[in-house]
Image (cartoon, rainbow, N blue to C red):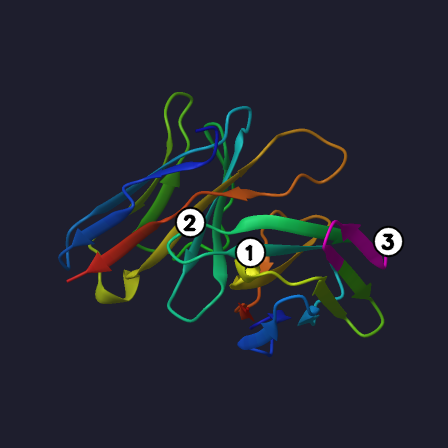
Amino acid sequence: DQQVKQNSPSLSVQEGRISILNCDYTNSMFDYFLWYKKYPAEGPTFLISISSIKDKNEDGRFTVFLNKSAKHLSLHIVPSQPGDSAVYFCAAKTNSGYALNFGKGTSLLVTP
Amino acid sequence: NAGVMQNPRHLVRRRGQEARLRCSPMKGHSHVYWYRQLPEEGLKFMVYLQKENIIDESGMPKERFSAEFPKEGPSILRIQQVVRGDSAAYFCASSPSGQGVYQPQHFGDGTRLSIL
């Protein structure tokens, strides 16, 4: 069963605008959430994370928002740059677990 | 290169052969994780190991798949008698040991396994 869902397979944004990538989860035991970025033929690269005790975490152009009641998180990238074009994976883990549960990814294209 | 090293990057096997995938964790990391990615899918957890110990293998298929992380040398994911459905990208990740603040897993570039 897919416990982490990224319902948008793709997203296209103009350079300089905001990119918003969404992620929903079903397991209420998840307490840590991560975003990874992946280029073709490479491994996922860690981008930003958030603990369930927070509702926002910011790192430069990247901000992750967590809405626990809605079991929803989002990644905001502003301003978007062509180099941000990649597949973005949302992942989650439980407090007692080691495994990361991944969504299927959203392919972001930032056009000049 | 201080990152997670996986080899080979590409591996082609015929049905029934064995596949061995190797992973050297980042320097200072003693926890290793293996994930599999099928086409158009996200990564699926397979197994979590520490040196000489399998901690969690809940994602490993019950047959033909095994993993080890010996005291010396890389972690090995071994697939015996491969079938077409084993074709996938296999990613290794590592993280530091210890308690306290959670440390994200860092991934290698994967091994792309193709079964003929």
Give the residues in magenta. A54-63
Q: Is residue A63 left or right of residue B57?
A: right
| Three-letter amino acid code of the residue under disc 1 | Lys
| Three-letter amino acid code of the residue under disc 2 | Phe
Which image quarter holds the C terminus of chain B? bottom left
- Residue A47: x and y, percent? 63, 50
Q: Secondary structure at mark 3?
A: loop
| Residue under label 1 | A37
**Residue B20 visible here:** yes
Q: Which mark is residue B84?
A: none
Question: What's the residue at 48%, 59% (across, down)?
Answer: B44
The CA distance from mark 2 to mark 3 is: 30 Å
Q: Secondary structure at mark 1?
A: strand
The CA distance from mark 1 to mark 3 is: 24 Å
| Residue under label 3 | A53
| Three-letter amino acid code of the residue under disc 3 | Ile
- Where is B27 relative to B62, above or below? above
Question: What's the residue at 54%, 62% (across, down)?
Answer: A82
Q: Main secondary structure of the magenta part?
A: strand
Q: Which mark is residue B91?
A: 2
- Examine the structure image and report whether residue A61 is included in the region drawn in magenta: yes
**Residue A31 visible here:** no
Give the number of the mark in front: 1 or 3.
Answer: 1
Q: Quadrant of residue B9?
A: top left
Q: Secondary structure at mark 2?
A: strand
- Examine the structure image and report whether residue A100 is included in the region drawn in magenta: no
- Where is B87 relative to B13, above or below? below
Residue contact at pointers 1 and 3, CB within 8 angstroms = no
Q: Quadrant of residue A34?
A: bottom right
Disc 3 packing (10 Å; few <14; some 14–19; many ≥20): few
Question: What's the residue at 76%, 57% (across, down)?
Answer: A63
